[in-house]
Amino acid sequence: MIGQLRAGLLLSRALPQFARRWSGRLAHERALEYKPGETIHGFTVNKVTPVPDLFLTAVQLSHENTGAKYLHIAREDSNNLFSVQLRTTPQDSTGAPHILEHTTLCGSEKYPCGDPFFKMLNRSLSTFMNAFTASDYTMYPFSTQNAKDFQNLMSVYLDAVFFPLLRELDFWQEGWRLEHTDPKNPSSPLIFKGIVFNEMKGALTDKDTVYAQQLQNHLLPDNTYAFVSGGDPFHIPDLTWEELKQFHATYYHPSNAKFFTYGDFPLETHLKQIHEDALSKFGRIEASTAVPAQKHWQAPREYHVACAVDSLAADPAKQTMVSVSFLLSQVTDQFESFVLNLLCTLLVDGPNSPFYKTLIESKLGNNFSPYTGFNDHTRDTYFSVGLQGISKEDVATVKNIIHRTIDEVIESGFEPERIEGFLHKLELQMRHQSTKFGLYLATSISTTWNHDGDPVETLKTNEHINKFRLLLKENPKILQEKLQQYIKDNPHMMTFSMSPEDDYNAKQAELESQKLNQKVTALSEEARKAVYEKGLELINLQTIPPDASCLPALKVSDIERTIPLTELDVAYSGAVPVQYSPQPTNGMVYFRAVSSLNSLPEELKPYVPLFCSVVTKMGCGVYNYREQAQQMELTTGGMEVTPKVVPHHSNLDAYEQGILFSSICLDRNMPDMMHLWSEIFSNPHLNDVERLKVLVKMSAQELSNGIPGSGHQYACIRAARTLTPAGELDELFTGMDQVNLMQRIADMPDMSSILRKLSRIRKYVLLSDSLRCSVNATPQQIPIAAKEVDRFLAGLHRNKKERKAVRPNIVETSCGQTTESEDSKKIIRKLVCEPNFKPCQMKTQFNLAFPVNYIGECIRTVPFTDPDFASLRLLAQVMSAKYIHREVREKGGAYGGGAQLGVGGLVTFYSYRDPNSMSTLNTFQKAIEWAKSEKFTEDDLNEAKLSVFSKVDSPVAPADQGMNQFLSGISDDMRQRHRERLFAATYSDLVNAAGKYLSMGKGTRAATILGPDNEAIKKDPTWIRLHFPTWDFFRCLYTSAALLPNKPVLCDATLISMYSDKIM
C-alpha cells in the first residue's frame, strides 16, 4: 500500500501552468519557448540551443541553491532517459568510487529495503537501468517509455545517490570482506570475498584491460588517472567502511552533480521532482574535485610491465604488446578534439590507413595494441598506436616503424577520399535512428561536461565539419601540421610494452596470500570473533525474504494489451522475394539478404564464419581490397556478412542455417552500395594468401581476447551444443570450437588450402538460389530502392537446376502468416529438420588461466509457439530475481547470474566472474526445487511479468522493424499470442512448468564451466576436462558423427572419459 500511495503521489505531479508548452508541436519545437533567465522550480534557464541536424533542442539550466548543472535534450523520442553524473576522482586504487556505486544501490532513506536497484528491474518497464564507474566520474542512468515509470525510477535513483544508507554489511557484500570458507565454522580458514573484489579479479584477467589500464596509469601519472578507479584486487582490502562513507560525503553532493534528461516528457515535471525530492535539502558547497591538467614531460619515457601467459594465444612465442602514446589536447577544446580525432582515425582506421599498412601488414604481430586510436575519456586526450602478438625482440622494430610512418605521413599527407570517407561516416551517425540515442548522448558528452566543458558543443557535429572543411580549403596541410605539432614534436611520448612471465600467476597468488595473511594476523581475538559474527549476520540478512513494499511499482494493468502491427509488403524480383518496410529512416536505406546453407557440404561448414569475416575485405570486381574499403567508406555505413542459425519457432529439432548480408547507406548512395554488393557476389577476390593471413591473425586474436569478457556466453553456447541441432551448429559457428579452429588456421604457414575452401563456399552462397532480401527505407525512397535491388538480383548467377540439400529433411515455412489470397506474396524459408536428433547430457570444463569461473547450464524445454513457453519465460525471470541473484551474487560473490529462456527453447542458467563453480550449479538446481515448492508469491509473478514485458516491448528502431518476421519467421500474430499468454499465465502455471520441464530427469540438460583448475571436477568422471587450445583430438572423437546427417552426437560419458585423460 505504501508503494502504491507513493507511486500515486509521483504521478500526480502535474503542472497545468506549463501545459501550454506541451500541446500540439514536437518536443524540440516546444522547448524553444524557454527563455534564458526564466526560473522553474529552483532552476534557472541559462541557454536554449536548437540543434536541427539531430532534431533536438538543448536546454541548459543551473540550480540556484546548490549550483547543480542540468541539461535537457528535448527530442521527439518516447524512450526517455535520466542520468545523474558526479565527478569522482580517486586518490588510490582501493576502488572507492566503484564500491560506492554498488553500495548506494543497496538501500536509501526513503527506500530502506535491500538492493532496491535490482528490485526495480522487476517493478518497472525500464528499457535500460545501470550505473557506470569511469576513471573520473560515476553515472547513474535509466530509460523508459512510460511517464509514471520515469517518475518512479527517478525517485529511487535520486534517493539512492544522495541519501544512501551505506550500511556496513552492504559494504561487506558489495566491496570486500574477510569470511570463513565455511561461514558457520569459525575454525575454517579466512578468505577474501566481495562482489567488486571478484569482479575486478575477473576484469583484470583480460590482458587488453590490463594493458589499457596500465598505459593510462603511466601516461597520466600526476593525478587521479594514476589509479585504478574500479579497484585493484590487491588494494581493495585496504578500503575501510569509514573511508567509503567519507568518499560519499565528499563527492556525492548536488554541487558536484550534473543532471541529464532526454526525450519527449515535459521538462518541468523533471525539475519539480528533482528539486523537491533531493536538491531542496542541500545548500551550496565548493566542490574541490577538479582534475588538474597533466604536467607535460620534457622528454619521452619508456615502461615495461609483466602479465600472465595467455593460454588462448595463437602463438605462445608471440605474446608481447607494445605501443607509443602521445599526450594531446584538453578534452574541453572540442573543435581541436574533433580535428585530432579525425587525424588519429585516418592514421589507424582500415586497410588504407598508414599504420595498418606499416604495422598490421608487416606481419610482426596480429593486431593493433589495445586502445589504439584517439582516446578522449580523460581530461587530457591522447593517441596510442602499436601492435600485439609480437616477439619481445621486435619491440624496438615496432617503435622504429611507428616513428618512420609518422615522418612519411607528415611528408605525404592523406588522400582527399579518405578524409571524405571519415566525414561521410559522421553524417551517417547523425542520421541513424537508434533506440538508445539518449544513452548515446549522455555518454558521449560525459567526459567534456565532467571537466566543465560545454556539453552542447559536443552535439554540433555539422558545425565542426563545416569549420574543418573551410580550414582544409584554406590550408590543405592542416592535418600534417597537427601531426607535426602533437605527435612528431611532442616530448610527452611514452613507449609502453607488456610481456608474459611464466610464474606471473603464481606471483599474483602469492601476493594475494600475503595480503590475506597480513589482514588475518592483524586481527585480535575480538576482531576475529567479530568477523565470524558479522559473517553470520550477513548470511542471515541475505536469507531473510526482502520486503520491497516501500518501492514504487507499475502494475500489469499499466501494460498495453496489444502490439502495434508492422507495415510490410512482399514483392518478387524474379524468383527472389523482397520484403519492404516503409519507415521514418531519416534518409537512410537498410538492406539485408539471407542466403541458405542447406546445400553446402558439411566439411565446409566450420569455415563459414571465416568466409563471412573476409569476403568483404579481400577486394571484388575491379577493386583491390584497399579500393574496396575506400568505396565502402565513401558510399556505405558498413557492409557486414555473418553466419545465421535460427531455431524454428515451433520445432526444437528444426532450424534455418544461412548467411546474413547487411548494409546501410544514405538514400543518395543506394546505387553505389548495391553495385558493391554486385561485385562481391559476382567476383570476390578469394585468391590473395597474404591478405588472408593478415585477416585471419586479426580475427583469431580478437576471438581469444573476447573470451574473458564474454566467458558466460561461451559457456552457455557450449552447454546448448548437445541439446538441439541449432545449438550444435551455433557452437560450430560462434563457440569455443570456432575459437580453436581460428587459432589453428592462424598457425598454418600456408593458407592456400583455406582459400580453396572459401572459394568453394562462395559457389554455394553468392548466388540468387535460396536468397531472400529486405529493405527498410522511407516510403518515398522504397520505389527507387526497389529498382536498385531488382538490378542487383538480375545480375546474380542462378543455377539452372536446384541443388540438393545435404541433409534430407527440409521443411518449408513462410515468414509469418499470410492469407490464402496473399500466398503468391509470401516468403518461404527452408529449414533443416533433424527428426532423429537425440539430445544428451554432457558436462564440460575448459581449464583456463582465470581466477574466476564462467558457468552455463541449459535445459531443453519447448519452442516459442508452445503454450507453456510464456510460463517458462516468466519462471526463469522469477528464479533469476528472487533466488539466483541472492544466492549467486549476494551470497556467492559472483558479479552476476541468472536464468533466461530463448526462442530456441532452452532454459539457460548462467553466472559471470564467479568465485564458485560446483556450488553454483547446485544453486541452479535448488532454484528449480524452490520454484516447484511454491516458495515465490503472486507479487513475484506480477513483477516477473513487468520485467519480461520491459524486454518484449523494448523500442524497435526503424532499421529493425519487420526483422522478427524476416529473419525468424515470427509474425505479429505469433507475438500477440505470446503476449496474451504472458498476461494469462498463473501462479500454478509456473509451478507446473517447473515440475514438468525443469525437474531432474525431465528435460535433458548440459553444463559447461570456463575457469581454473577444479579439484572436484577432476574427481568426477562424468565431467569432460579440456585444456585450451588442445582439444582437437577430443573434438574429432565426438563431432565427426555430428557432421553426418541424422547421426546423434556421441556423448557416452564412459567412452569420453577413456580419452579425456590422454589430452590433459
Image (cartoon, rainbow, N blue to C red):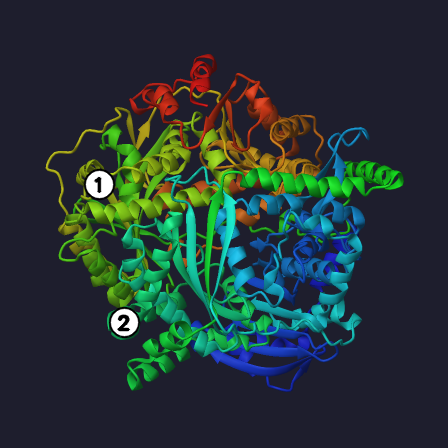
Question: Which numbered disc covers residue 508?
Answer: none
From the viewer's side, name the closer residue of 819 and 255.
Answer: 255
Residue 881 seen in the figure? no
Taking the image as shown, residue 577 lies to the left or right of residue 723, namely left
Residue 995 falls in image quadrant: top right
Q: Secondary structure at mark 1?
A: helix
Residue drawn at x 46%, y 29% is 1027
Q: Secondary structure at mark 2?
A: loop
Residue 485 image position (x, y, % from top left): 40, 77
Residue 330 image position (x, y, % from top left): 51, 75
Residue 642 falls in image quadrant: top left
Outermost residue toward the right?
526
Work out whether mark 2 precedes mark 1 in sequence or the reverse, and give the earlier one.
Answer: 2
Residue drawn at x 56%, y 67% is 446
Q: Which residue is mark 2?
A: 414
Residue 611 image position (x, y, % from top left): 26, 42
Residue drawn at x 18%, y 47% is 688
Q: Residues within 10 Å of mark 2 (few under 14, many from 20)?
A: many
- Measured Cα–Cα span from mark 2 to mark 1: 37 Å
Residue drawn at x 71%, y 73% is 287
Q: Which residue is mark 1?
A: 765
Residue 787, compared with residue 689, is above or below; it is below
- For badge 1, the amino acid type reads Val
